[in-house]
Image (cartoon, rainbow, N blue to C red):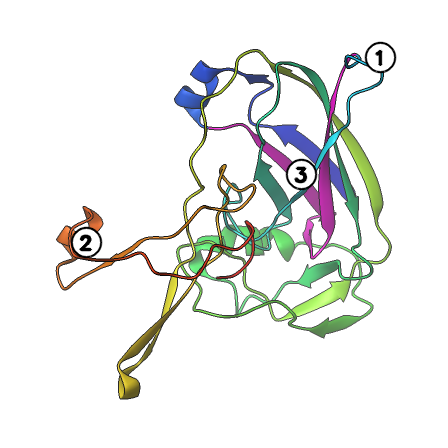
Amino acid sequence: IVLKGWLSSAVVTTNTSLASGPVIVYAKVWSGIRAVIGGQVEARIQRLGMNSTGSAFQPVLFLLHDNGDGADITRNDGVYSRYLPSLSLGRYIVTVTATDHDGRAALIVPDPTTLSPSHHHLGSRLMMGGPVIRRTRALTYDQEGAYCCGSRVPYTRTQDAGMIAREDMIGVLDVLEDVITQPPSRVTDLRAIVNPAVRQITLIWTAPGNQLDHGRAHHYEMVFGRNAGHVTTGKGTRLTDLEQPKTAGKHS
């Protein structure tokens, strides 16, 4: 099992953020040509130098996600990612670590009957060779909602990944300018469950943060109406008395 980390940019400036978007930390965890899902992948951002007391700076630690939300593009593809949080000016060393998450990590057993067209190429690669399958288990991840928009890799069986303890030093990150406050990340997995009998619609989504996919958003606002064009421009009936946002990455 191999862990490989990288950054979307090794320099943080206002121009970098405006031109190519916020900096993202990536970590790919694969065994041969198969993705490892369900692992625990953590980024460690260590500022170089000493603080005012002559001690080393406290590292910034945060988990990366393979959930298809926030900075992550595709769920269950073995590439874990997350936006870089706000950092003080300085030079940092970025390291990522991966563990089996107390035995939760698994390898997807390819099944061409469940691969969506958007992942056909990935499925073809997964089917070429790889380790001999010794033990499999049933589908374990949350299947709420239909597959949509190429945002997840579907599967029906997994193989235990075994014990994982990997570390990869990505390299140096330079924060040269204070970046303007970032908005909450986009909600990319909004789903609606309609109950016509009681004229009720239940909405489910993954909570964004108050700074991209970190922290907790301040509040939610919802706009609905019969004209889709009006709703997308903010016109329609507006609701603000909604549940309090949860910590980024949690289901609302």
Q: Quadrant of residue 180?
A: top left
**Does residue 77 lie above or below 181 as drawn?**
below
Q: Residue at x 73, y 53 (%)?
A: 39
- Say if the magenta span includes residue 25: yes
**Residue 21 location (% of width, % of height):** 44, 27
- Tag shown at residue 231: 2
Q: Residue at x 16, y 56 (%)?
A: 236
**Residue 181 location (% of width, % of height):** 45, 27
User: Which residue carries the number 3 mark?
Assistant: 27
Q: Nearer the viewer, residue 160 or 116?
A: 160
Give the distance between the C-alpha atoms of the residues marked 2 and 3, in whole angstroms. 37 Å
**Residue 184 location (% of width, % of height):** 44, 41
User: Which residue carries the number 1 mark?
Assistant: 54
Stretch of the chain drawn in magenta: 22-49
The answer to whether marks 3 and 1 mark residues whose Cβ atoms lie closer than 8 Å is: no
How many labels were placed on the picture?
3
